Image (spheres, grey):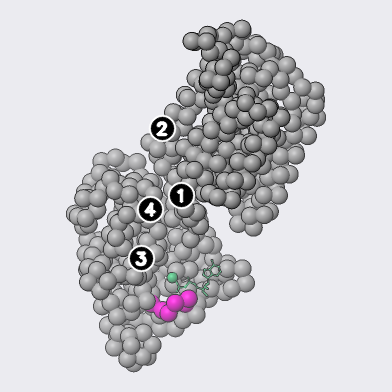
Amino acid sequence: MDFFNVFVQQIINGVSLGSIYALIALGYTMVYGIIKLINFAHGDIYMVGAYVSFFAVTMANMSIVPALLISMVVTALLGMLVERLAYAPLRHAPRISVLITAIGMSFLLEYGSMYFVSPTPRTFPEVMGNLAYNIGGFVINGQQLLIFAITTILMIILTYVVQKTKVGQAMRAVSFDTETAQLMGINANRIINFTFGIGSALAAAGGVLVGVYYNSIDPLMGIMPGLKAFVAAVFGGIGSIPGAMAGGIMLGVIEALVSGFISSTFRDAAAFAILILVLLFRPSGIFGKAVREKV
Amino acid sequence: MAAMLEMKDVNVFYGNIHAIQDVNLSVNQGEIVTLIGANGAGKSTTLRTISGLLKPKSGEIFFEGQPIGGQPAQNIVKAGISQVPEGRRIFANMTVLENLELGAYTRSDKDGIAADMEVVFGRFPRLKERLQQEAGTLSGGEQQMLAMGRALMSRPKLLLLDEPSMGLAPILIKEIFSIISDINATGTTILLVEQNANMALKVAHRAYVLETGRITLSGDADELASSEAIRKAYLGG
Ligand SMILES: Nc1ncnc2c1ncn2[C@@H]1O[C@H](COP(=O)(O)OP(=O)(O)O)[C@@H](O)[C@H]1O
Ligand SMILES: [Mg+2]
């Protein structure tokens, strides 16, 4: 293949991988936007999402879309439970306490999962068969199509909820100024909890899609994508929803190009080099506004 | 008749800081009551406690006979108290319309909301012209009007205003105070916090003076305005 072919093929691969980063990054960015917490347990929520759909497909013989929906619902409830039990009691505690709690929660989910589902990686069943389309010499496989379709649908729904519904308006208000939102009669605790639910459901979708894409899941699978999605969220401008979408996809594309043209060994290094560069030169991210501290 | 709002021996702390001490204050239906005092006296703390953003350590707050002290903020709004916070605190990244809609967050009567929106436009015609504009682009005076319009959208029985004249040009201050009188004349009871004691005492019926967390004086606004102590401390002679 010549340069152009490799380029286009890597863009296709990169957008698929990046869509998954974007789905996870959305949860990071929404939670950060609303309570200024980097939720380190978010990557593990994504892992739980992958497992729930794994069991739904293998044990309950579900097809992938119902399995995805079940996984999103279960994981949303888990995310809300984690928020209620671990973070809500620390609402007025120093930020560092909440951060440490999030790290603890991350370990709890990782090693709790090892205990319950064993540390052995599981093979995610083939749900898309060997579907592959050849479009003008470029290969898009069934998994990638599923990723594009699911991600697009979820992002449209999310944008609609956040921009057009009453609860979305309340989310934006709490995120902008929690106290004033409360003066409007908004139950901020409920909105924060709801935000965790939505973020967790999106991460679960990412986990399911990764299972479908790479066919393998394990209890520590959330660590690396969790970090990458965090990079994506910072890249796009932490707190910004369009930023997380764009940041995730761009990160996926950059990684794929580095793999395709340099070496896949440098893929992860590239991701973290981006984090460092963004933090050095544009800490508010590509979509971020100037950093605004809460009054 | 019992007072609409009644605070009894209320104490509020920020950590170790005793911000308001044994505050007793009442507001009767239909009144404008003003709470004046220097910067740091505890005026905002008093309003934030009534609104449920702060919990009193001791003491009681009654609204229309019901105890509301320490209740979550959304319950206070539903009970009929809304606040225009110090510094306006509009949602700068949202449109004027969205800000007003958020003011009606606790309501679901679509027709009533639409009607009240018209009332707000009647009072603040400039907001109507700027409905789709991002609220952060409004001038200071317009932002104050938006904050007041937003608070009125919950159709409050009692409106709490925290330094509405802060940072505004004298001509706008006059306009804001005349709007406050109008809002009161159409049946909304008002508790007005001000550092601009001069103007506040002119529109108010009664007044309380807060000094370092304690109420040191109270009475008819006219009487306080002519009292020697007040003139010296707050009215510049
Ligand atoms: N968030 C806070 N944390 C600690 N102390 C505070 C806080 N807010 C206000 N205070 C203190 O409480 C006292 C009363 O403040 P405040 O109610 O804002 O006064 P005012 O509105 O009359 O200017 C002041 O001494 C102030 O420094
Ligand atoms: Mg104040």
* Res A124 quadrant in image: top right
Q: Which mark is residue B165?
A: none
State the extent of the magenta-drawn residues as a range: B36-41
Indicate whether B223 appears above or below A36: below
Q: Nearer the viewer, residue A66 or B223?
A: A66
**Spatial distance from mark 4 to mark 2, Cα to Cα?**
21 Å
Q: Is residue A34 above or below residue A211?
A: below
Report crowding for label 1: few under 14, some 14 to 19, many 20 or more residues within 10 A (C-alpha): few
Please state the horizontal and vertical placement of residue A138, each as a whole percent of the image.
53, 13
Label 4 element class = loop
Type of residue at label 4? Ala
Q: In terms of image quarters, where does ligand 2 lie?
A: bottom left
Visible in this render: residue A76?
Answer: no
Q: Nearer the viewer, mark 1 or mark 2?
A: 1
Where residue B89 sits in the image (x, y, percent)? 40, 58
**Residue at 68% over, 27% down:** A263
Q: Quadrant of residue A118?
A: top right
Q: Which numbered dot is residue A160? A: 2
Could you give the CA–CA distance between mark 2 and mark 3, rounded to whole angstroms? 35 Å
Residue A251: quadrant of the picture: top right
Asked if badge 1 and badge 4 are on a common chain, one would say: no
Disc 4: which residue: B92
**Dot 3 or dot 4, earlier in sequence:** 4
Q: Residue drawn 71% across and 20% down? A: A216
**Are dots 1 and 3 in contact, CB under 8 Å?**
no
Residue at 57% across, 38% down: A232
Q: Amino acid at mark 3?
A: Leu
Q: Which residue position holds label 1?
A: A289
In the picture as drawn, the residue positioned furthest to the top comes out as A130
